Amino acid sequence: MSLLELKNVSKIYGELHALDQANLTVEKGEWIAIMGPSGSGKSTMMNIISCMDRPTSGQVIFDGKDITKESRRKLTEFHRDKIGLVFQQFHLINYLTAVENVMVAQYYHSMPDEKEALEALERVGLKERARHLPSQLSGGEQQRVCIARALINSPELILADEPTGNLDEANENIVLDIFRQLHKEGTSLVVVTHDPEVGEVAQRIVRLDHGKIVSDRKNEHFTE
Amino acid sequence: MNKKQRMFFRMVAASLVRRRSRMIVALLAIVVGATILSGLGMIYYDVPRQMSAQFRSYGANIILTPDNENGIEENTLKAAVAAFDKEQLQGYTPYRYENSKIHNMPVTLAATDFQSVLKTSPYWHITGSLPAAEGEALIGAKTAESLGLSLGDTAAAVNSFTVTDTTDISGIPDYEIVTDPETGEQYCDHELELKITGILETGGSEEDYIYIHSADMNSLLLRERGYDVVEVSVAAMQKELKGYTEAISRQVKGVSAKLVKRVTASESTVLTKLESLVLIVTLVVLALTMICVATTMTAVIAERRKEIGLRKALGALNSSIVAEFLSEGLVLGGVGGILGSVLGYYFADIVSMNVFSSGITLRPLLIPITILASVLVTGAACLIPIRSAVDVDPALVLKGE
């Protein structure tokens, strides 16, 4: 059974077809890059996959369950339990320390545990910076806190929106190494990016243009 | 407390402490509101007390009169005065009126206690001074004019006794008995030399009398008698004053107590209007304060729209976000209420000192009321913007739209 299936999914805003009859399957443990130019529908697809938005038509099936018609509350719960989000702008709460930012995700999911949060930070190489506020961290460090926060609840899918968009090359490599590690451990990854270098390290590359999936291919150069 | 509850308080505390500059702005708005509420509340409750004391400058508000011809005896007076609360009793002045003659013109002498007279009649305007020793007199301006007397003059008050077998005139020094040639009745005049130390102007009936010491009155009339009237000044509201008059009339024999209605009714009217005015001002200021706090809290919450979107993206339910933000508001409201209660007392004290020239009386009940009001107002002020903020679409907010 696939982890995620989008069946003929469309999202229409007035005259604009942000997503048009998109079909996508994500297998468990798969690493997919969704690529495309600005306005191609990447963000719309990500919002639908992350349950933060609903399609105008079509079906979203997650782990065998059709979640298209679920209530907003159910979708929130579903998203909280199954998906970890990584943002381009990091979106850390600026008055909470790194470890507290990670614990916030635990707080809304189940039960906060500082030890586990510290372990998640250690996993992304930031244990020593756990007591620092976001303003005291570099962009790369903030993104790693964001990844630790996404990982803390052991989600079935990590959904990353332009995760290296605001990073320099060194930090981009660190983040991609973390993704490789997560993939090795069996975590499913969907990375939305317009950066070819980030796209080319994924196992599979899906290209969007004007809301349509224009190509969906395996990456022949993919290496573990 | 479990880990979840600890994390809740950790987040609330972090927001309050680490977002200090923002929180101080919000706290300041709440403290100002609570200070005004507490201060005006204390002034509102203290106005009757302060104004009652101020109104005492209009003179006595209770009159004691005797039920018999002997007047009010000293013991009876003490019993009547004991009925008043010592804190409220500003003073009392007894008067005994007798007729006499000066320069062969009829005059009314009023014996009184000059030490207490200004407590019940603070509006008296005296040129010169109050009589200090026996043989001195304070003369009303009208009487002084009709008798042609001025400050420092001396005049003899004359009392004529009809000499009968029972009249003891031995107290009159060098007395001379005169026989009326027509009726055959015998008279003996008794004179009392009075030195005018002060001239009294009130614009009222007080100007018709000559005020002397009780000892001089006894000496002139050769007999003692109770008082004809006792003026009492009490710092109390009309209802309480009425209670006093009823209690005295009921409990003390030989005395009737009455309100000086022109004074008490005027006081009551002015006080009611003043209380209404302060109440209206308090309510208007409270409404403006609520708007100010609500506006500040709306601004504070609006700038955290992205954070709310993030929390929703992390799986927070609307109820969780409302609880967290509301808790911050309630803590601010509580702290603002405590600070406002303290500052409000000083604010009211300064106002009272400037307006009434006396300090404010602390009303302890106003402290919890202010804190509770501050918490409720802040909570209500937070709830409206929070409820609209939690409806944000996290996807749009996180995209920066």
Image (cartoon, grey):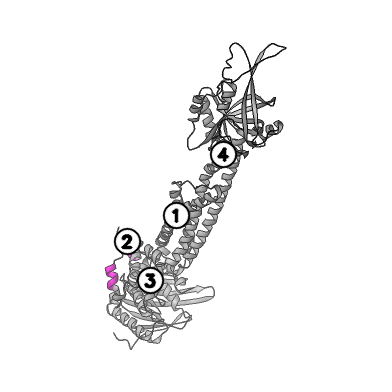
- Was residue A115 drawn as part of the magenta stretch in this picture? yes
Name the residue carrying label 3. A61
**Magenta span dominant secondary structure:** helix
Name the residue carrying label 1. B337
Could you tell which of marks 2 and 4 lies nearer the N-terminus? 2
Do we see residue B68 in this rendering?
no
Cα distance between the residues tagged 2 and 3: 37 Å
Could you tell which of marks 1 and 4 lies nearer the N-terminus? 4
Name the residue carrying label 2. B6
Q: Is residue B206 left or right of residue B244?
A: right
Cα distance between the residues tagged 1 and 2: 25 Å
Q: Residue at x 56, y 52 (%)?
A: B284
Q: Relative to residue B217, is residue B375 depicted above or below? A: below
Element under disc 3: strand
Magenta region: A109-119
* Quarter of the figure with residue B225: top right
Q: Nearer the viewer, residue A198 or A219?
A: A198
Nearest to the eye among marks 1 and 2: give it.
1
| Label 1 chain ID | B
Number of numbered tags placed on the structure image:
4
Nearest to the eye among marks 2 and 4: give it.
4
Instruction: Please state which amino acid type lies under the numbered disc 3.
Output: Ile
Nearest to the eye among marks 3 and 1: give it.
1
Residues tagged by mark 3 and mark 4 found on one chain of the structure: no
Residues tagged by mark 1 and mark 4 found on one chain of the structure: yes
Q: Residue A72 location, x and y as percent?
A: 42, 64
Q: Nearer the viewer, residue B196 or A222?
A: B196
Name the residue carrying label 4. B56
Q: Is residue B263 left or right of residue A140?
A: right
Q: Residue B45 location, x and y as percent?
A: 51, 45
Q: Relative to residue A19, is residue B256 depicted above or below? A: above
Q: Residue at x 47, y 61 (%)?
A: B28
